[in-house]
Image (tube, grey):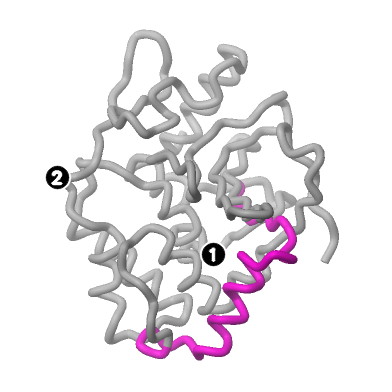
Amino acid sequence: MTAAPHLPGFEDEELLPGEALATEPAFWLAHLVLITDHQAEDPEVYGVAPDAYRAMLERLFGAEAPTLLLRVPFRHGHTACVIYQNFEDECDTDFLVHHPAWGRFGFLGQFGPHGSGPGLSWPELVSLVRSEADPDAEGLRDHAQRLLLLLPALGDADTPLEEARRTVAGALAAVGFRPDVVVEFAAQLLGEPDRKPRWFLTPDSPIPICSSNYSPRQVPLALGITEEQTRTLAAALSGH
């Protein structure tokens, strides 16, 4: 496994590409239980062997686990990144957006002791999943994998719940979950919309901001990039 390119803010980290894990249902179970109170006490219920699940937890969160980077390239050269980091006494999973022309990254949220989020609205998530990217860009291409990787960053009171549940259930089945559990699991992952925040535009930026006090997107995403870069990012997030 070769080292991935360094990202601004992670210059001292050796980021190892982790996209190969996307072929393993155990990875998706470990990744997705981050966003629900439901505990995977019996991985076999989901079609995941218990030994494989325990090994995956150690691979992601063990004391000797490397820092892993999984990427979703999308329009205009942007990349959504998920980074698994392990420290002496805690584990963090960061959700970011990056472009090689920036000297910074846009923060979508974090799962860990000091968690924050959400970082994506439903229309943005769908746009990133379906987005066409540079053929040479590194990262996941499969729509189901892209959706499930970025799903923890979702939080949107206007999510079309029936459509979202069907979409997430289909993605869960596509990555290897048992067909008889995907509908219920999708509902658990998405939760109820009345507990989630709203997204809106302001005169200050073409990039939506979030109403949640816990969201890093209470300010425009990647604040500090140029006006042209901001417009290009806004277009990419909206599918243009």
Q: CA distance from mark 2 to mark 1?
A: 30 Å
Q: Residues within 10 Å of mark 2 (few under 14, many from 20)?
A: few
The numbered mark, 2 or 1, whose residue comes first in the sequence reads 1
Looking at the image, residue 52 sits to the left or right of residue 87; the answer is left
Please give the name of the residue rendered at 63% of the width and 73% of the height, measured from the top-left corner.
58
Instruction: Magenta stretch: give its range.
Output: 44-73
Instruction: For label 1, count other residues whose C-alpha is less than 10 Å away and answer few (under 14), some (14-19) or many (20+).
Output: some
Q: Residue at x 58, y 55 (%)?
A: 91
* Quadrant of the snapshot with the N terminus: bottom right
Say which element carries label 1. Answer: loop
Q: In the image, what residue type sits under mark 2?
A: Asp
Question: Where residue 173 sits: x, y (%)?
Answer: 39, 78
Image location (x, y in percent) of residue 202? 32, 14
Q: Which residue is at a point 85% across and 61% down the rendered structure image? A: 2
> Which mark's residue is nearer the viewer, 2 or 1?
2
Depicted 23 relative to depicted 132: above or below? below
Whether 78 is drawn above or below 135: the answer is above
Q: Viewer-proximal residue, 146 or 113?
A: 113
Q: What residue is shown at x 56% (from left), y 46% (from top)?
A: 94
* Number of the label disc, if any, that sits on residue 194: 2
The residue carrying mark 1 is 142
